[in-house]
Amino acid sequence: MKKYIVTIIILFIIIFLSVGGYFVYANVKTNESNDGQMLKEKGISEVEYLGSTITSIMNGINNITYSNYRIISEEIKTDDKSSNSESGSGNGESNSASGGEGSNSTTQNNSINNSSMVANSLLEQKDVNINWTELNSQLQEIYSSWPTIMMDLTSLNVNKDNLLKFNSKLDEIAKNFENKDEKKSLISLSELYDLVNLYIKDFSGDETKKSVFDVRARILSAYAYTESEDWAKVSENIAKAKEHFSNILNNQVNNMNKIDVINKSYILINELEQDSNDKSVKTFLVNYENLMQELQNI
């Protein structure tokens, strides 16, 4: 009888430990899953930050902005003149042959910065004054954030060889900025975006998001080649953008709330294709600007 009771107690202990161990294991797995999901969401935010900053820098080379107005500053120089007169007499002598008065005049050059708001029209834009200081500032922000982003993407098992290419491409862009080379800068920046596009493919399960990145990458590359008017490259990239966009069109059932934006984006891609055929830089830039705004909403 005593032996039977001992056996029952041992069984209860075993069951208790098994159930307790299961709950501990399940809790650990849940925490790991939550941590993994949080890291993935952080990685997506970081990749989107890189993509939007690269796009902003590329747009800055042609003064493209998504607002209807822009502020321009103009330095106005003014001349301030002042004169001092001296008069005096002594022992019947005059300080000057003209009546005892002498005068000194001084001129000071001052400048006033005048700012005004003007309508932002790419069609009317003639000479582009690139703000290299601002572009370098944005590039520096990417340099500063990259070490942390790289560690997170490494934890998400993003291809290490592709990660190592990022800093080298940043250095290449910095050199192009130093030389104020618009054409090479745009090409290098589009290639940097291509790397970002590869990163999100390695860990995101959102097919629509990946397709949007694909489309943006090809549109940015097409935009980069308009600077050198390499229309063959422009057309090639637009054709690839249309192929990638077909994945979004085929997945419209899951994006019914964005159907209008999707259709408008598709129309704009076709407009870009026509601009490429017409070899029209200005209308291409207008449709490019509109398309990039629409893609932000998909």
Image (spheres, grey):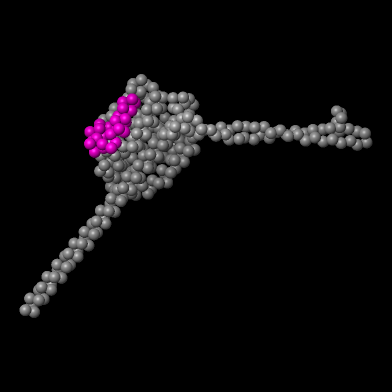
Q: Position of residue 125 (x, y in %)?
A: 47, 26
Q: Is residue 154 visible?
A: no
Outermost residue toward the bottom in this view: 2
| Residue at position x 33%, y 25% in the image | 271
Quadrant assignment, res 14: bottom left
Quarter placement of the N terminus? bottom left
Outermost residue toward the top in this view: 278
Q: Position of residue 200 (x, y in %)?
A: 30, 42
248 in magenta: yes
Q: Position of residue 65 (x, y in %)?
A: 43, 33
Q: 191 or 251: nearer the eye?
A: 251
| Residue at position x 46%, y 41% in the image | 137
280 in magenta: no
Q: Is residue 224 left or right of residue 36?
A: right
Quadrant assignment, res 264: top left
Q: Is residue 17 left or right of residue 288?
A: left
Q: Main secondary structure of the magenta part?
A: helix
Please report the bounds of the magenta region as a residue range: 245-272
| Residue at position x 53%, y 33% in the image | 116
| Total number of numbered discs in the rendering | 0
Q: Is residue 5 visible?
A: yes
Q: Is residue 171 left or right of residue 255?
A: right
Q: 26 or 261: nearer the eye?
A: 261
Is residue 23 placed above or below 265 in the rendered structure?
A: below
Outermost residue toward the left in this view: 1
| Residue at position x 71%, y 33% in the image | 81
Q: Position of residue 118 (x, y in %)?
A: 50, 30
Quarter placement of the C terminus? top left
